[in-house]
Image (cartoon, rainbow, N blue to C red):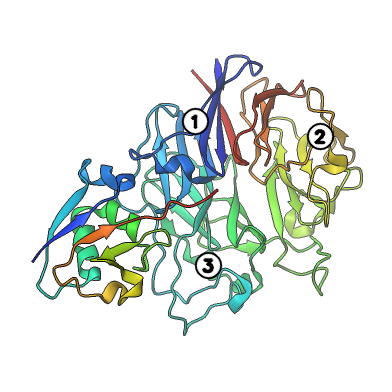
Amino acid sequence: MAYLVLIGTRKGLFTATSDDRVHWSVDGPAKLDADGFTAVAEIFAAACDPATGRILVGASTFFGPSIWRSDDHGNTWDEPVNAPMEFPQDLPYRPLDYSDTAGIDQPDATDTNTVKKIWQLTFGPGDRVWAGVEPTSLWTSDDSGRTFTFNQALWDHPQHTTWASGGAGPAVHTIVTHPDDPDALTIAISSGGIYQTHDDGRTWHGITKGITVDYGPDTTPESGQCIHKVTRDADGTLYAQSHGPAYRATRPDGGWTDISATLPTKFGFAIVAHPTEPGNITAWPVGESMDRTPPDHRIAPWRTTDRGETWTPWNDGLPDEDYYGTVMRDGACTDHAPGNPGWYFGTRCGDVWAADDGGTWHQVAAHLPDVLCVRAMEAP
Amino acid sequence: MTTDVKIPAALASECDGARHLTVDLDEHATLADLLDAIARTHPRLARRLRDESGKLRRYVNIYIGDDESRRLQGLDTPLDNREIQILPSIAGG
């Protein structure tokens, strides 16, 4: 069995293949479109489905955002003729930045909402695909990502007035599925919070209470927190990396437990759960405040196997000299390979590494454009 | 009137490789009318040029004669039998 890694960067999509996760062949930037302008597109979202081999890529191009699909492991690409998603034009405008109260409806504005960026693509059962989009919105497809329906209920959530624009823009950037309940979904918004639905998106309730902030007047708000990433472990426990600490919640409506005590910093973006071992979580801490680089300038993920009580660096094979490239929120993943899941991450220095479960890191690629997302799967 | 639209290489595949498009329009047609007509025959080309609100995308410039449409009346600019050229800005370092 071979492994395929999708590497979304600031300038295009790269792919890497290997038979052993040690020796890699890298190709790209991919020309998803026939004219080749996607080779310089920002690729914030990629998704791959090991069950079907299908790949979806969300690209932000000179000619707007769109979604490309491959059913042959990235050898050929297809894009819908019509826009896969278009914002309803009868909604009040919600500004994207602080120039006019970000996130607050502006019913008298002449501007209307448009899809700015596709942040997350997640496969569901059958032909279901979810998309997280900027401005803050969730979209659903039941035709494998060709057409999407806008989720009005989340847009209308009363807490939307507490949502704002993080450094990367206001977006639904995380979509976590439930393995046994296709109607259940957990999403995260930066900044905004964490929300769940148990009825396929018809209603949403916030579960962010208990996640603290140190950058606002209210340190314990109900919503509005800057959530960087959420992951779900094998027994259903949620783990969140916030702008401040990392947290764990077995019952989110009962509160969150700070699990950052033995991490080198509280801050970070990427956090990924082991696909089969409960309590086994890998995080990529980032220096806080004015040092948004790896802690002590050493690139390394940190891993816990006891639900966040203790963390240790997982750095065998990684550089031992100063390193300043951070791992962004979707810059790390597992390939979910049964028995020996592989792990992958890429940095804003354009370096990508891979490892067997708990093993030595091997370089997949170096000196690429800065890495925005990494996804991987087994491929024949 | 028959309007000739020059297509940039970066979008040529949307016209089967052709570098121009011929569009029949009303005598008093505006740029918006032209783009609406393109949307009916070449929907993917049209969404490369305008977002769902109808505005020209940031990196898309459309020249009407010698002037870029934003310096004229924007989408309301009458075409007046002038040559149309789509000229995208390819930006970024």
Helix, strand or loop at mark 1? loop
Q: Chain under label 3?
A: A
Percent across and percent down for residue A82 are: 30, 52
Query: Which tag is nearer the camera, tag 2 or tag 3?
Result: 2
* Residue A368 relative to residue A218: left or right: left
Q: Which residue is mark 1?
A: A28
Q: Amino acid at mark 1?
A: Gly
Helix, strand or loop at mark 2? strand
Q: CA distance from mark 2 to mark 1?
A: 31 Å
Q: Mark 2: few, some, or many residues within 10 Å (few <14, many ≥20)?
A: many
Q: Which residue is mark 2?
A: A303
Percent across and percent down for residue A363 are: 68, 24
Task: Please tell me whether residue A337 is drawn above or below residue A299 in the rendered image.
Answer: above
Q: CA distance from mark 2 to mark 3?
A: 35 Å
Q: Amino acid at mark 2?
A: Arg
Q: Nearer the viewer, residue A51 or A312?
A: A312
Q: Which residue is mark 3?
A: A155
Residue at 90% from the left image edge and 38% from the top image edge: A310
Q: Nearer the viewer, residue A33 or A212?
A: A33
* Residue A307 relative to residue A352: left or right: right
Q: CA distance from mark 3 to mark 1?
A: 37 Å
Q: How many marks?
A: 3
Q: Chain under label 2?
A: A
Residue at 37% from the left image edge and 62% from the top image edge: B51
Helix, strand or loop at mark 3? helix
